[in-house]
Image: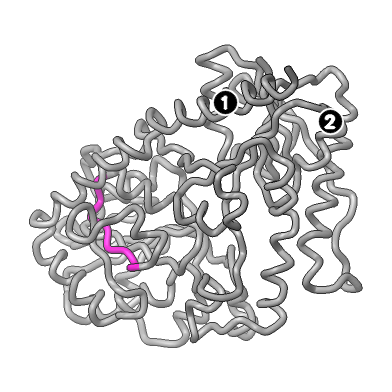
C-alpha cells in the first residue's frame, strides 16, 4: 500500500502517522510539503514550490482563497512531475486546498482530509475578546476564508477533526462525513518522570521555589498571554517563593495583535503596560520537546488559556506529563478538562479568581496532585497514540473500502 500525505509543513499532524506506517507496517509513505526534499524515517519527502500568491490588488476577503489555489496548483505540479507515484490513498490538511486538484492526477484514489477549523465571525475567537475587537472587514473575510474548506468537504471521501468542538463548527450538511479522531499524544515523550534537578536551559531554579508555568507557540492574545502575566504578577506580589517559567517564542501566530501594539511585539507591549519583577520571570524561548516535558514535570501549576479556538498541543502534553493544569473555562477546553476531576477551570477574564485558585494550589501542590494523575490517565485512555493511531488507520481503511465498493 502507498499513502500520500499532503501538508504545507513537515511533519505537522501527519508525521507520526507516516513514520509508524513506514516503520511498523511496511507501508510506503510519501509526504509532500514546502520543506526540503529528502528521506525521514522511511518517508520520502517531496517539495512543492508556490510560484505566486495574493497581491494588494486582490480583495482583502479573497486573498486566503487566492493563496490556497496557488498552493493547490503547486502540489499538483510537483506530483505531476513524478509519474512513478501512484498512491492508494491521499491524506491532506484542508484549508490550503492541497488535495483539491489531485482528482485530475489520480482519479478514483480516495481522499481523506483533516479539518482543523471552520471560521465564524460571531460567537467565535473573533469576538470573544472585546478588548481586542475585530474589524468589520475581518468579520467579512471570515466568511470568505471557508471557501477552500467547503471545496475540500465536497471533494474528499472522508474527513476527520481532532475534537468534537472543532467538528461541530463545520456546516451541518457535512458533519456526518467527518469523524472525530485526535492526532495522538506520544506518551513515550510526554509522561511523568523523575527530575533530579531544577536546571532548565541554563537557568538554575531555586530548590524551594514554587514554579508557575506557561507554554505557547507564540505569546499572543488568542492564547491569553496578557491575562496570564496579570495573574502571575498578582501571585508574585503575594508570594516570595514563586518563580514563573514561560516557554514559547516572542511572536504572534494567530490574530491581529499587531494592530494594537504600535509596532512592538505582543510580549513587549504586555511587559510595557505594567511593572513586573522580571528577576522572577524566566523566558525560555522555543525549547525542544524533551525540555518542555521536563518543564511540565517540574511545574507546580501550569496555566493554559485560550479563546474559543483550536486546542494547543501543549495542553495535552502538559496533562500527559501529570502537571496540575488551571485552564480557561472555554468551550474547546471543556471537552478535555473537567473541573476538579482532571484539572481546574476559571473564567478567561477572571484574573482575581484565577489568581486565588492558583494561590491555593501553590500553597498545597500535593493536595492537587490527584488532578495530574487523572490527566495522565485520561490522555492515555482517550488521546494517546496507542489509542488514536488505530482509529486513524481504521478511518483510512474505510475510505479505501468505500471507494472500492463505489467503483465495483
- Image: 111 above or below 402: below
Which type of secondary structure does the marked residue at label 2 adopt?
helix
Disc sitting over residue 136 in the figure:
none
Residue 161 vs 189, above or below: the answer is below
Q: Position of residue 295 (x, y in %)?
A: 32, 50
Residue 380 in the magenta stretch? The answer is no
Question: Is residue 26 toward the left or the right of residue 49 in the image?
Answer: left
Q: Is residue 260 visible?
A: yes
What residue do we see at 55% from left, 20% from top?
A: 21
Q: Is residue 23 above or below residue 389?
A: above
Residue named by callout 1: 398
Is 140 or 300 nearer to us in this picture?
Answer: 140
**Horizontal and vertical percent position of residue 176:** 55, 45
Q: Quadrant of the C terminus?
A: top right
Tell me, for residue 79, which label it has, or none: 2
The magenta segment is 322-329
Residue 255 placement (x, y as % from top left): 59, 71
> Where is the N terminus found, in terms of image quarters?
top right
294 vs 33, nearest the viewer: 33
**Between discs 2 and 1, the one toward the N terminus:** 2
Instruction: Tell me which residue sits at (38%, 28%) in the image.
Output: 386
Identify whether 114 is placed above or below 214: above
Rendering quarter of residue 365: bottom left
Give the crowd class for mark 2: few <14, some 14-19, many >=20 residues within 10 Å. some
Whether 327 is among the magenta residues is: yes
Counting other residues with Cα less than 10 Å from the Cα at mark 1, is it few (<14), some (14-19), or many (20 or more)? some
- Residue 215 occupies which quadrant of the picture? bottom left
Depth check, front residue: 154 or 262: 154
* Residue 129, x across and y down, in percent: 48, 80
Res 34 seen here = no
Amino acid at each position: 500500500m502507498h499513502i500520500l500525505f499532503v501538508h504545507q509543513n513537515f511533519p505537522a499532524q501527519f508525521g507520526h502517522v507516516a513514520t509508524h506506517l513506514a516503520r511498523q507496517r511496511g507501508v510506503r509513505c510519501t509526504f509532500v510539503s514546502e520543506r526540503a526534499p529528502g528521506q525521514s524515517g522511511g518517508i520520502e519527502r517531496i517539495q512543492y514550490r508556490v510560484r505566486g500568491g495574493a497581491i494588494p490588488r486582490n480583495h482583502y476577503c479573497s486573498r486566503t482563497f487566492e493563496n490556497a489555489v496557488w498552493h493547490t496548483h503547486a502540489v499538483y505540479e510537483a506530483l505531476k512531475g513524478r509519474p512513478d507515484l501512484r498512491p492508494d490513498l491521499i491524506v491532506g490538511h484542508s484549508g490550503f486546498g492541497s488535495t483539491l486538484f489531485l482528482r485530475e492526477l489520480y482519479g478514483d484514489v480516495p481522499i481523506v482530509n483533516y479539518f482543523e477549523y471552520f471560521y465564524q465571525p460571531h460567537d467565535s475567537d473573533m469576538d470573544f475578546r472585546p478588548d481586542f475587537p475585530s474589524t468589520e472587514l475581518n468579520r467579512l473575510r471570515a466568511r470568505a476564508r471557508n471557501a477552500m474548506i467547503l471545496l475540500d468537504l465536497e471533494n474528499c471521501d472522508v474527513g476527520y477533526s481532532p475534537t468534537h468542538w472543532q467538528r461541530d463548527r463545520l456546516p451541518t450538511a457535512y458533519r456526518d462525513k467527518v469523524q472525530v479522531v485526535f492526532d495522538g499524544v506520544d506518551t513515550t515523550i510526554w509522561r511523568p518522570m523523575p527530575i533530579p534537578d531544577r536546571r532548565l536551559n541554563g537557568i538554575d531554579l531555586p530548590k524551594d521555589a514554587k514554579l508557575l508555568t506557561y507554554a505557547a507557540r507564540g505569546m499572543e492574545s488568542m492564547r491569553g498571554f496578557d491575562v496570564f502575566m496579570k495573574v502571575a504578577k498578582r501571585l508574585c506580589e503575594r508570594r516570595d517563593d514563586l518563580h514563573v517559567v514561560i516557554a514559547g517564542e516572542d511572536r504572534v501566530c494567530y490574530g491581529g495583535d499587531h494592530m494594537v501594539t504600535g509596532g512592538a511585539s505582543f510580549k513587549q507591549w504586555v511587559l510595557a503596560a505594567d511593572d513586573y519583577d522580571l528577576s522572577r520571570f524566566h523566558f525560555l524561548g522555543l525549547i525542544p520537546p524533551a525540555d518542555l516535558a521536563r518543564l511540565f514535570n517540574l511545574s507546580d501549576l501550569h496555566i493554559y488559556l485560550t479563546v474559543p479556538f483550536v486546542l494547543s498541543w501543549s495542553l495535552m502534553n502538559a496533562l500527559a506529563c501529570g502537571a496540575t493544569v488551571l485552564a480557561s473555562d472555554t468551550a474547546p477546553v471543556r471537552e478535555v478538562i473537567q473541573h476538579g476531576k482532571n484539572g481546574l477551570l476559571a473564567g478567561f477574564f477572571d484574573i482575581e479568581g484565577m489568581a486565588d485558585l492558583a494561590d491555593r494550589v501553590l500553597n498545597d501542590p500535593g493536595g492537587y496532585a490527584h488532578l495530574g494523575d487523572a490527566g495522565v490517565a485520561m490522555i492515555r485512555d482517550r488521546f494517546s497514540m496507542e489509542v488514536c493511531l488505530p482509529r486513524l488507520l481504521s478511518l483510512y481503511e474505510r475510505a479505501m473500502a468505500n471507494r472500492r465498493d463505489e467503483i465495483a
